[in-house]
Image: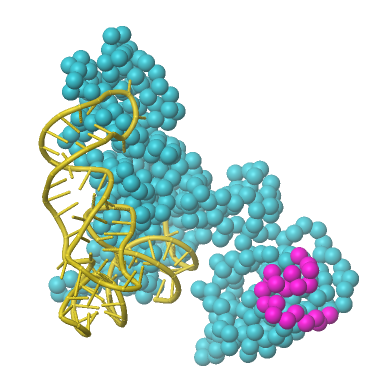
Amino acid sequence: MRTSQYLLSTLKETPAHAEVVSHQLMLRAGLIRHLASGLYTWLPTGLKVLKKVENIVREEMERAGSIEVLMPMVQPSDLWEESGRWDDYGPELLRLNDRHQRPFVLGPTHEEVITKLVSNEVSSYKQLPMNLFQIQTKFRDEIRPRFGVMRGREFLMKDAYSFHSTDECLKQTYQVMFDAYCRIFERLGLDFRPVIADNGSIGGEGSHEFHVLADSGEDDIAFSDASDYAANIEKAEALAPSGERATPTQELNKVATPDAKTIESVANFLKIEANTTVKTLLVLGEAKDDEAAPIIALVVRGDHELNELKAEKLEGIASPLTFATDEQLVAATGANAGSIGPVNLNIRVIADRSAAHLADFVCGANEDGFHFIGANWERDVTTYEVADLRNVVAGDPSPCGQGNIVIKRGIEVGHIFQLGQKYAQAMNCGVLTESGKNQTLTMGCYGIGVSRIVAAAIEQNHDKYGIKWPEAIAPYQVAIVPMNMHKSARVQETAQNLYAQLQQAGIEVIFDDRKERPGVMFADHELMGTPKLLVVGERNLDNQQIELKDRITGEKSLIAIDSVMALFNK
RNA sequence: CGGUGAUUAGCGCAGCUUGGUAGCGCACUUGGUUUGGGUCCAAGGGGUCGCAAGUUCGAAUCUUGCAUCACCGACCA
């Protein structure tokens, strides 16, 4: 490609609205342009990267035995009614009507369509397992799109779905996909981790997310510092503190704590550490029949945070987790927020393992402006349950039994689920077994955010000059940058010969034939992140040499012109 | 959806307080100059000042309403 005939579109200045570095660089390097909230045009350079990611994903999916299909982005609503997600999915699902006022959705994912397809096309156990994938544009009407293509509303996704007659078989394919994902992210040149994940709204059991580690990531990942254990923080188990609970030494004693409504202020006022206090949060339980929802008290140590996901999974607790209103608080405890505690509460009390391990702790006295000191479980709180309710924090013992927890930020670029029979059941998708009986299929599903990977790769590979593409996804392998080509026939001839040779060899080369000053060209190619720069200049031609600059290492070296092609023979 | 802030040329911004009919830098066009790290000079093109209504002789500027965008909190690849 010659730059004079290309849409280069680099920007000197950073657009004000771009917050994260990948978004800034994607705009500056001319990869994308903003159209509307969460919607982007991919410019030629960006599209080249996107296609490279896409191809690696495709190759590895095919190698792992998945077969490519392409499903419509616009889907009839009745499929979604059938699965139950027409009602469950919420406003993120963009709904629209056609000219006949028939309702459709813009596909945010394709479980419905694929299940319908397989249900029609696959009828014998002999055809199983079946694993199908597509690489296609998805639309999710995100509440808050942000960070450029990192969280766009329209985005490119690879989604795969596998179908099985036994759980055993699903687990095998799940492992094959797990391994394929590892290969994909390795080939992409990314620093990534598979982490244990929650299944979210999709349901089913068994799930891993694949995260690219970067400070700008939106998720917290809990790692063990001594093993491969990694889990999304919402899923990482917080173990009970080791050892027996200490024996009570203090009497229960009510003290006035005027205006101390937060753990911090109570701890300051009483001159104690937050980890000797507990906070009590009231949430709604599941409503039975016509009765009002019961109020349930969740107790975590003062220095810990409630994990809402863990809480809402407990039996009898309303999901999604709903906090009690101020009126409900007063009605249930007699006190306002800030003075509530588990002592003398006649509602269900669930304590986090760490909170339950405390002796002689401080808690609200269920009377505005008062706290108890010297509170103890059993003696003062006769009935309570213990559960894992909190987020792990750095330094906690790892649930895997080895090492301690370290927390890092990650960008979720892949997610694999064991789905189970949720969709197959709802949409009546089954096969005939060996014995001629109808059997509902078990499914797995496997997503990769293709466009998000482009942003994630930049988050992980950039410097103050611009992008430093991993070789596998660089839009161009090499750039030819001639110095003052319009003044030197030698330079022009050498550059053009090199360009022709490289092109002929099938190497992706960008030839900067603009009549620009050297600095402008260097800046543009460094911004765009081309891994190798070939600088052709008068000053080295007498020795039949050109300069090679490596974008990743920054190293410059002089090489013989006729050895250039050897750089690309691997 | 709530909170905060913004909206003036493709991009980055000034002008608004104190109304008088729009300006700077980058980019773009032309000419010259310069040439191994975003040269310099000159001349130019490009804006219904987000939209609508109001106040006024007169509105980018004041008032009201609406829209859009971004950031902070609940969703997900």
* Residues in magenta, as a range: A253-273
Q: Is residue A508 left or right of residue A363?
A: left
Q: In which quarter of the image is residue A220?
A: bottom right
Q: Is residue A83 magenta?
A: no
Identified at 30% across, 36% down, the residue is A524
Q: Is residue A509 left or right of residue A215?
A: left
Residue A321: image location, x then y, percent = 54, 74
Above or below, comparing residue A1 to residue B46 in the picture: above
Residue A560 in view in this figure: yes
Above or below, comparing residue A511 to residue A83 in the picture: above
Residue A546: image location, x then y, percent = 31, 17
Above or below, comparing residue A192 to residue A567 in the picture: below
Residue A133 in view in this figure: no
Q: Quadrant of residue A569?
A: top left
Above or below, comparing residue A119 to residue A377 in the picture: above
Q: Which quadrant of the rendered structure holds the C terminus of chain A?
A: top left
Q: Is residue A264 magenta?
A: yes
Chain B, hue in figure: yellow
Chain A, hue in figure: cyan
